[in-house]
Amino acid sequence: MAALVKSLAALACAFALIAIILLALGASSVAVLGALIEGAFGNRLAFTETIVKATPLVFTGLAISIAFEGALWNIGAEGQLIVGALAAGALGPRLGSWPHPIAILAMLAGGFMGGALWGGLAGWLKSARHVNEIISTIMMNFIALQILSWAVHGPLIEPGGAYPKSAPIAAAAELHLYFAPSRLNLGMLLAVILAIASFVLLYRTTIGLRLRALGRNPRASRFFGIGIGTLTVGTMALSGALAGLGGAVQVAAITHRLYETLSPGWGFEAIAVALLARLNPLGVVPCALLFGALDNGSQAMQRAAGVSPELVQVIQALVILILLAFDAGLFVAHRGESGFGCTLPPAGFEEARDA
């Protein structure tokens, strides 16, 4: 409950600061907020588009949450999503003769394995070579972008080669859309199921307990017999797999092909989503919907109130800064707590040892 209050307080502070800025610029904060809400939820099409924009943020937000809970600073969800999309997009055009359910599963499996490979590689670099995962995952984002660019200009370019994009995936591999002309699909349902599964994994299993123990005190975890190396690689692989699934869903349901600007930065925006959710997988879903609403309503805000859509990014940045300020104050007051305001009771290490 305290974590929820802190997140809501951070949001309230961010919007209050934005209101002050708008007032100084001579704009009406009420009109801006009204336009934002209207653009995100004003009608059925706007509401479903908000869900569509939030879906990749749920996948990447879950990826960030699981890694961060183990104090593994995965800044590479963007690259992992791209590699997952690349694997699915390369497989999709070859599934024309497959039954629809099997083709969809193959697309999702391709994205899952592609993201897992990319995340697991960063985990192996940390475990075996002691490479800082912040550096490796940031660098691997650029490598993934370059591989995608090479692929759509080279081996995966559409027949005829007129534009740098891949051939469309087979119709059998497409996730169906609902409530036309909206782009709503089953991707969000899958994301919600994975959020529940991630919560159970983190808080109801011995693996989750070991992961959280690793995040609180690696030295104590090693003392109680937790395999740090294996857990590191496995956690980063799982984190990457979730992000890769988000890329596969995007290709299967929305773009139906690959191109260079496939992601507008979902992997980076997901960091804000995960922090606002306090790394709780169940909290990632509403937080992703909030950020999806901000993204979807930004254009309407610009049209109706004459305010730049970049204001949305300012709100997101303020939320992160305010949360970090809250946590910094909490850390000073309670040295035993982690940077995210979560504690692991000493008994937890006994459970980890016995498991």
Image (cartoon, rainbow, N blue to C red):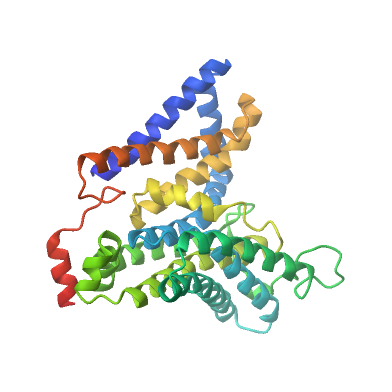
Q: Position of residue 312 (x, y in %)?
A: 54, 36
Residue 257 visible here: no
Q: Tell me the quarter of the picture where residue 323 sits.
A: top left
Q: Position of residue 141 (x, y in %)?
A: 58, 61
Image side of residue 338 versus residue 241, left or right: left
The C terminus: image quadrant: bottom left
Q: Position of residue 225 (x, y in %)?
A: 22, 77
Using the image, determine if residue 172 lies above or below residue 258: below
Residue at left 24%, top 42%? Answer: 2
Q: Choose between 210 and 243: the one closer to the eye.
A: 210
Residue at left 76%, top 65%? Answer: 165
Q: Choose between 95 and 149: the one closer to the eye.
A: 149
Residue 103 visible here: yes
Using the image, determine if residue 124 lies above or below residue 333: below
Residue at left 20%, top 72%? Answer: 223
Q: How many marks?
A: 0
Q: Position of residue 169 (x, y in %)?
A: 69, 72
Using the image, determine if residue 288 lies above or below residue 213: above
The N terminus: image quadrant: top left
Residue at left 37%, top 36%? Answer: 10
